[in-house]
Amino acid sequence: MSALRPIRVMRIIARLNVGGPALHVTLLTGRLGPPEFESTLVCGRIGPGEGDMAYLAAERGIAPVMIPELGRELHPLRDVVTLLKLWRLMRRLKPDVVHTHTAKAGFVGRWAAWLARVPVRVHTFHGHVFHGYFSPARTRFFLALERLTARLTDRLITISPALRDELAGVYRVAPAEKFAVIPLGLELAPFAAAPRRQGALRAAHLIPPGAPLIGIVGRIVPIKNHALFLRMAARVLQAQPDAYFVVVGDGAERAAIEALAERLGLRKRVIFTGWVQDLVPVFSDLDLLVLSSDNEGTPTAIMQALAAGVPVVATAVGGVPDLLRGGAWGRLVPPRDPDALAGAVLSALGDPPPDPALREAVLAEYDAGRLADSLAALYRALLAGKGRRV
C-alpha cells in the first residue's frame, strides 16, 4: 500500500434516522477526510414515521451511497440482496477499513467485508438489542448471529465501559480483549454557548417564562418508555402544579403516548413538539432533562443537556450510569419506577444550578474531535498489525 494513498474507510449504517448513531457516523465521515482518509458513508432508507437526519450529511457535503434494502429489520431475501450490493461496492471501492454501526448493518456489512477480503473490519455497539426489544426466542437468535459475526471482526467498539462489560461478560458476544471503549463525541459547543432560558421554545408553545419545564428528547418508541415519563409527570404535578412537560421527538408510539396523556389528564401540561432539527433552543429553555428508557447505550440528549447546563434525571440502564459518573453528573433512578423518577425530578428542581466546571468536563470528554482522533489511531493500529500500513 502506498504511503501517499489515503486510508479508505467505508462506514455502514442501516439508516440515518434521528438518534445518536446517525449523528456519530455523519460527524466521523465528515472529520475523517483528506489528506489522510477517504471516507464513504453507506446507508439504507428511513422507515415510515421515522425522523430523517440526512440533512446533517448534506450540511457537511456528504453524499451517502444509498442501498434501499439496508433497512432496520432482518429479511432473508432483502439481506442477500444487500450483502451482494455491499460486496460489489467494496470490490469496486477497495476500502482498507469497513466500520459498521447498528445491528442490521453490522451483521450484513461485516459478512460482505469478510467476503470482499477487506483488511480491517470494525463494529460499534451504540447499545444492543439483547434486552427489551424482542421475544426471548428472537433475542437468542440475534445473539447467536452476533457471536458468529464477532469472529469476523477485528475490533468491537463500545461507547461505555458498562456496555463492554455487559456484552463481554453477560452476553458473551466476544472476549473482553476484543473490545475497545471509545466514548461518543458530538459538536457540543453550540449548546454550551447558548444562554440559558432564551425563551424561544416557551414562546412557541405558550409556556409561562417562570414555570418549571421538564423535557424528554428522543424517538417515541417502546424502549424509551415515554409512558413512564407521563406517569412521573402526573405525580410531579401533584406537588408542583405549575410545572410543564415537553416531549421532543416523534415515532411509532406517539399516538399511544398522546392517548395516555389524555387518560392521565395531562394534555394541558404536556406538549408534543414532533421532530426538531435545531435542539439548541430546546435545551436552552429546559429546566430539567429526563430519560426514562428501559435500555440505552450513551444517550446524546444527556450529553447535549449537560453541555447546555441542564440538570439530568435518568434511569440507571445501559451506559447511562457511566455517562453520569455513577450519579455525580446527574440523578439516577431504577428503571420502570414512576415514584422514584418523580421524587428525583422534584429534588432536582430544587437544586442549585449545575457547576460550570461540569459543562467544561463534558465538552472535554465528549468532543467530536477527540472521537475522530481516537478512531483514526485505532484504524492505523489495526492496519499496521496486518502489515498494511505503518
Image (cartoon, rainbow, N blue to C red):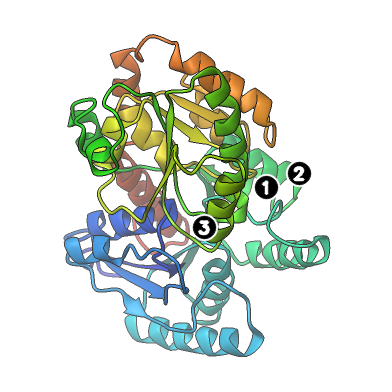
The residue carrying mark 1 is 167
**Front residue of 204 and 22:** 204
> Hey, what amino acid is under mark 1?
Leu
> Hey, what amino acid is under mark 2?
Val
Query: Dot 2, how many residues are within 10 Å of its Cα: few (below 14), some (14-19), or many (20+)?
Result: few
Is residue 38 something that shows in the picture?
Answer: no
**Mark toward the viewer: 3 or 2:** 3
64 vs 233, left or right, is left
Label 2, secondary structure: give it: helix
Lower sequence index among marks 1 and 3: 1
**Whole-number angstrom distance, CA of label 1 to CA of label 3:** 31 Å
Lower sequence index among marks 3 and 2: 2
Q: How many marks?
A: 3
Contact (Cβ within 8 Å) of mark 3 with mark 2: no
In this view, 223 is above or below 183: below
The residue carrying mark 3 is 254
* Quarter where residue 115 is shown: bottom right
**Front residue of 32 and 312:** 312
**Front residue of 296 and 90:** 296
The residue carrying mark 2 is 170
Query: Dot 3, how many residues are within 10 Å of its Cα: few (below 14), some (14-19), or many (20+)?
Result: many
**Front residue of 185 and 206:** 206
Mark carried by residue 197? none
For the C terminus, the quadrant is: bottom left
In this view, 387 is above or below 1: above
Contact (Cβ within 8 Å) of mark 1 with mark 3: no
In this view, 288 is above or below 179: above
**Whole-number angstrom distance, CA of label 1 to CA of label 2:** 6 Å
Label 3, secondary structure: give it: helix
Where residue 310 appears, as percent x and y from the top left, is 36, 26
**Whole-number angstrom distance, CA of label 3 to CA of label 2:** 33 Å
Where residue 303 appears, as percent x and y from the top left, is 39, 35
